[in-house]
Amino acid sequence: MARAKALSRAGGLLSIHSDAASARPLFEQGLAIAREIGDRKAEANLLCNLGDISTNSDLPAARAALEQSLAIHREIGNPSGIAHSSLLLGNVALNQGQFAEAQALYSESLSLNRALGNPQKIGHALWCLARCGITQDGYASVRALLEECVALFRGMKDPWGLSAALALAGA
């Protein structure tokens, strides 16, 4: 399992630096190992990583990987994994014009992250919900979400989250 984790972390570093092409084989190798040894949580996390790096290049592949990830996280009862996979799958749904599905997935992620008490991920889910709402109904429909998002990121002193929230709010 140590090798699968190392491959996952190396792939994660590459994906942070926008090198999905180099990250993919590392995630795939880690996934093969996780499946071979029966580590369902690692399998779900690696599927999530594969889905995430596919979002900008292959939405059907991203959806398939993220749906598998979400199903496994549900099966093993991992609320953090469910929240993360739901958020990323919401991004795919939004990019595919499936607004109701995206909103439901973002709402699930927000609810779980509130229960887990993770302010960074709460802020991200709020931002995603607001982006989805703006796409559908315009700014007025999401004003409260954006206000909460801005306050949360401001309180955490998170300049990146705050700037993203303010940009979305048009401030």
Image (cartoon, rainbow, N blue to C red):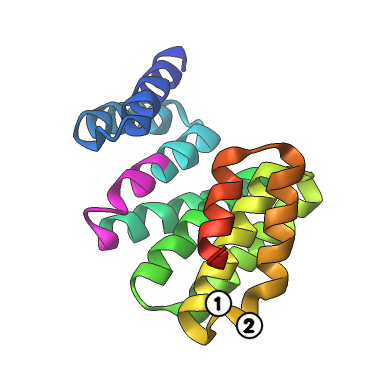
Tag shown at residue 141? 2
For disc 1, the marked residue is 133
Question: Percent position (x, y) of residue 123?
Answer: 66, 52
Residue 169 visible in this rendered orientation of the protein: yes
**Residue at 57 percent of width and 78 percent of height:** 139
In the picture as drawn, the residue positioned furthest to the top comes out as 2
Looking at the picture, does residue 43 appear above or below residue 144?
Answer: above
Residue 105 visible in this rendered orientation of the protein: no
Query: Which quadrant of the view contains residue 14?
Result: top left
**Residue at 41 percent of width and 37 percent of height:** 46
Query: Which quadrant of the view contains residue 32?
Result: top left
Question: Percent position (x, y) of residue 143?
Answer: 67, 74
Question: Percent position (x, y) of residue 61?
Answer: 27, 56
Could you tell me the amino acid type at mark 1? Gly
**Residue at 27 percent of width and 30 percent of height:** 23
Q: Is residue 14 magenta?
A: no
Question: Percent position (x, y) of residue 10?
Answer: 36, 20
Magenta stretch mostly in which secondary structure? Answer: helix
Could you tell me the amino acid type at mark 2? Ser
Looking at the picture, does residue 70 appear above or below residue 119?
Answer: below
Tag shown at residue 41? none
The answer for how far apart the CA atoms under marks 1 and 2 are is: 7 Å
Using the image as rendered, state which of residue 103 and residue 163 is in the foreground.
Answer: 163
Indicate the secondary structure of the residue bearing disc 1.
helix
Mark 2 Cα within 10 Å, few/some/many (few <14, many 20+)?
Answer: few
Q: Earlier in the sequence, mark 1 or mark 2?
A: 1
In the picture as drawn, the residue positioned furthest to the front comes out as 171
Span shown in magenta: 49-60
Instruction: Look at the numbered discs 1 and 2 and tell me whether their residues touch, using CB distance below 8 Å.
Output: yes
Indicate the secondary structure of the residue bearing disc 2.
helix
Using the image as rendered, state which of residue 125 and residue 164 is in the foreground.
Answer: 164
Q: Is residue 53 magenta?
A: yes
